[in-house]
Amino acid sequence: MNSKRTLILGATTNSSRYAYMAANKLVDHGHEIVLIGIKKGEVAGVPIQNKLEKQNNIDTITMYLGPKNQVEYYDFILVTKPKRVIFNPGTWNPELIEKLEAKNIEAIDACTLVMLAANTY
C-alpha cells in the first residue's frame, strides 16, 4: 500500500466529528497525518497544530472546514502544494477550487472515510 502523507484541516479532539474519525482511519490504513485545528489536543497519537507552519511532502489535504472558514487558509494550502485536496461533504468551495486548479492541484468532491472504506484513497 502507498502511504499518503495527509494533512487534516479542521482537526478536532471531538470523537463525534468526522475529522476525528478520519484521522483515526487514516492512521489505521497506514497513512501519516498532520493535524491542523483551532483547539489543542491530539488525535491518534498526533498533536493538533494551531500555527500554520510550512509543511513538506503533503500528498493530500482533506478538508473539514466550511467554505467561509477556509479563506484564511488559502495561502497556506497553495504554498503546501498538495497533489490533491479532498472536499468532504459540506466543504465544497468553488473559489478555492479555482485557485487550486490554477496551480494544477486536483480538487476532489468526496468523503475521506468512504474513500478509505472503498480502498479508493
Image (cartoon, helix red, strand yellow):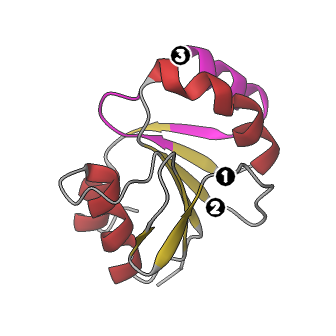
Q: Where residue 54 sits: x, y (%)?
A: 81, 55
Camera-nearest residue between 15 and 119: 15
Q: Is residue 105 magenta?
A: yes
The residue labelled by disc 3 is 94
- Residue range (magenta): 86-107
The residue labelled by disc 2 is 59
Note whether 90 is above or below 59 in the view shown.
above
Q: Earlier in the sequence, mark 3 or mark 1?
A: 1
Mark carried by residue 10:
none
Side (left or right) of 27 relative to 20: right
Residue beneath the point at 76% across and 48% down? 81
Q: Are marks 1 and 2 in contact (CB under 8 Å)?
A: yes
Examine the rendering and report whether any part of residue 104 can be seen: no
Amino acid type at image mark 1: Lys
Secondary element at image label 3: helix
Q: Where residue 114 sits: x, y (%)?
A: 24, 55
Side (left or right) of 60 relative to 112: right
Secondary element at image label 2: loop
Side (left or right) of 89 relative to 92: left
Quadrant containing the C terminus in the rendered view: bottom left
Examine the rendering and report whether any part of residue 74 can be seen: yes
Few, some or many C-alpha atoms within 10 Å of disc 2 (few <14, some 14-19, many ≥20)?
some
Amino acid type at image mark 3: Pro
Note whether 97 is above or below 20 in the view shown.
above
Q: Earlier in the sequence, mark 1 or mark 2?
A: 2
Alpha-carbon span between mark 2 and mark 3: 21 Å
The residue labelled by disc 1 is 83
Alpha-carbon span between mark 1 and mark 2: 5 Å
Q: Is residue 76 magenta?
A: no
